[in-house]
Amino acid sequence: MRALRERGLLIVSGCAIPLTLLLALEVAARSGAVNPIFLPPPSAILATFWSIVASGGFAAPLAQTVLFLFVGYGIGCATAIVLGILMGSSRPIFNLLEPLIELLRPLPKPALLPALILFLGLGARMEITIVALGCFFPVLINTLQGVRAVDPTMINTARTFGHGRVAIWRRILLPASAPYILAGMRISLGLGLILVVTAEMISGNGGLGDAILAAQRTFLVKESYAWLVVLALLGLALTWFFSMVERRLAFWSAPPVQ
Amino acid sequence: MTQLTADASARSVPRFRSYRLRDSRASGVALVLVLLGLWEASARLGIVQSSNWPPFSTVMTTLFASIADGELLPVVLSTLWRLARGYAIGCALGIGAGFLIGLYRPVRLALLPTIDLLRPIPIPAIIPPLIFLMGLGDTLRLFAIAFATFFPVALNTIAGVQAVEPVYHQVARTFGVPRAAALRRVVFPAALPFILAGLRTSLGIAFVVTVIAEMIVGQEGIGYYLITMEFAMRAAEMYGGIILVTCIAYLLNRGFLAWEARAIRWARLAETMQGDRA
Amino acid sequence: MSIATDARSAIAARAAVSGSRLTVDGIGKSFQGPGGSAVEAIGTVSLDVAPGEFLAIVGPSGCGKSTLLQVIAGLMLPSTGRVRLGERDVTGEPAHMVYLFQQYSKSLLPWMTVANNVMFAFRHRMKLSQAASLARCRDYLAMVGLADVAAHYPWQLSGGMQQRVAIARALAAEPQVLLMDEPFSSVDALTRLDLHSLILDLWTQKRFTAVLVTHDVDEAIFLADRVAVLTQRPATISEVIETRLPRPRHSIETRESPAFLALRHRLLDYLLTRGGGRSHARSA
């Protein structure tokens, strides 16, 4: 009851500030307090946004961005989880790979874009690679921590019951470190989106990032803002989708601090 | 990327245990050397024949030459100065908002949903529309850096302020410590481990965003330098730039960690000592 | 409320040998429960504590002892009734009362040295010079036998030493009333006996009014002039017993005296059969 009321209050009061802000922008643009050419009134942006949506013009860039993001994300996460569990459960593998990873981890991934463009061109391969690289490290580090945090008695219990290596992986290491892995994947998803948008902006080869920058370069002000709205909604949708998945997959772990 | 050293989640309790194992990493070092050797050999022996693939030694000598002749120094300084300003603005706003939101329920109700709404926006995307508003100057880049810095700092500060032991508040009250002094001498230090974790996370993010902003709308800075070298097909300079950027990111994180460890030495020691006794 | 005036009046009050009587007048406290219904923590409690008296409040765990003490301290407002110190109603934390917390490891601030922790107690109320503050801090640390650890951090000390620091800090604020919330419950048994003697010594020296909440019957009898027995939640006072044991009390002899043992028998009987000894009643 009380929690429900609190939630309702949060929604009402939470909407108040964005709505006030939008209203203020609307008034400012219409009254000429800010130049409406550079900051069009929200209603005009909304209309443009709607025309993009209604004409279906948003579909192709959105589909490309989401496709590249998910493929890169999938490759990055899968590799990282496998390597993370391997490194976490085997000392020699850890010792072999740890220095290389420590060396590459601080590398700001967008800085790799120019090099990747030289090698892989401006297309899908480059974009997927940069996303995969960016998503790889947070997931790897978290998987490693998760595996390390698994209580050895859990593994020993499984051994006593005669479970093999594969069963221990599947039934113990993976589920027990899942909350950590998922936390890493959450960070990676946001990072992946940033990287795919940056790559699209720099390569100019389709996608939402390209659309937004192209609109800016051709001075299509309203379109530029409308594309930003599309990207913001995509970000929100991904966040929402991920917390849903996380709740379903790691239901036994404590919810994150709020 | 430096923010990835943060724990499972940016909002989680900061940990102080080092994850590095100090036993034999000879095999790992050997692997790194072998890979560098392969790089060198593949370029020198023409296994990978491409003007995009200069040998490692050439990259390093080019890098040192560019540093020595003073070509890179202004580039790096310009990036760092931009980073410092944007980061400082973002941190100040983030800590301020974090305290207000963490301490006062009405502010929390009003602002937290807006923050949750804005946080998932991919930062590079805000740059193009804002070009109309702010032009191509530094204002835009500073805004983007501060925007990216703000969220982890604010969220960690909120978590830190709310995680302050209720007993600490009561201690301040029972000795009649005025509100302002209690904030400064009790709430702030108690929340400091969380705040610093947020500052460290966002330092990494801020650096990345600085580089991105320079790449997208740059006329100066290391991000712009990288893009220019790519266009000019000067591969050795470009790889040198990437190595330099990595070193800067590493040093920023290391430096922050060292400073953080000193600033909240009490938290780490208190944790281990109390742990020993329990 | 002016801090400086408060500090002066606090000092003046000390000089007059602590004059104010602590009156707890029909206090009740209820909380909003998880289902939205009110949960009554304290029924109706009235107490009258003379200046310089040592009162102990015992009760079964979870009966609302700490809540009662926090209401008395002004850290929490009562739902009904009022608390008075002398002529003044207690509606915030009053300058003349200090609360000694159960968890010393949490009540000492880990980012401050022992000295700064002690000075924290008075530097915001009494505007003293740095030298005077240090001298005062040194005095109080010496009083609890810890003059040499001023520069240490609390977490570098043992549990017993930490609670000594907490005691020194509480007394450094020169309270008329010291409210103690099970302050000895998380130290080992021998240290506890040691701290009992210490607190009695300090009480004799400084003559503050002491109110101790505890679930340890022996501790209550050994320290107090009167022992109030609380019932199960919602807490009400079922009995107030005067100990009438001679002072100074001695760690071993007092505890072995027939009068002590008789009191102990009587109190335990109350607690186990009437106060809330449901399990005992069932097994009987």
Image (tube, coloured by chain):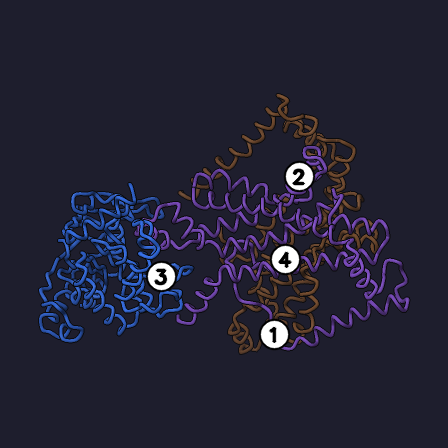
Chain colours: A brown, B purple, C blue
Q: Which badge, 2 or 1, comes first in the chain's sequence?
A: 1
C84 relative position to A239: left or right: left
How many angstroms separate mark 1 from mark 3 (CA)?
Answer: 38 Å
C180 relative position to A188: left or right: left
How many angstroms separate mark 2 from mark 4 (CA)?
Answer: 23 Å
Q: Are marks 4 and 1 on the same chain?
A: yes
Q: Are marks 2 and 1 on the same chain?
A: yes
- What SS does tag 1 mark? loop
How many angstroms separate mark 4 from mark 1 (CA)?
Answer: 22 Å
**Is A188 rendered above or below residue C224?**
above
Report which quarter residue B125 is drawn in.
Answer: top right
Q: Which mark is residue B139?
A: 2
Q: Which chain is home to disc 4?
A: B
Q: Which chain is home to disc 3?
A: C
Q: Which mark is residue B22?
A: 1
Q: Nearer the viewer, residue B221 or A17?
A: B221
The amino acid on which the numbered mark 2 sits, given as a three-letter code, is Thr
**Residue indicated by mark 3:** C115
Mark 2 or mark 1, which is nearer to you?
A: 2
- What SS does tag 4 mark? helix
- What SS does tag 3 mark? helix
**Residue indicated by mark 4:** B252
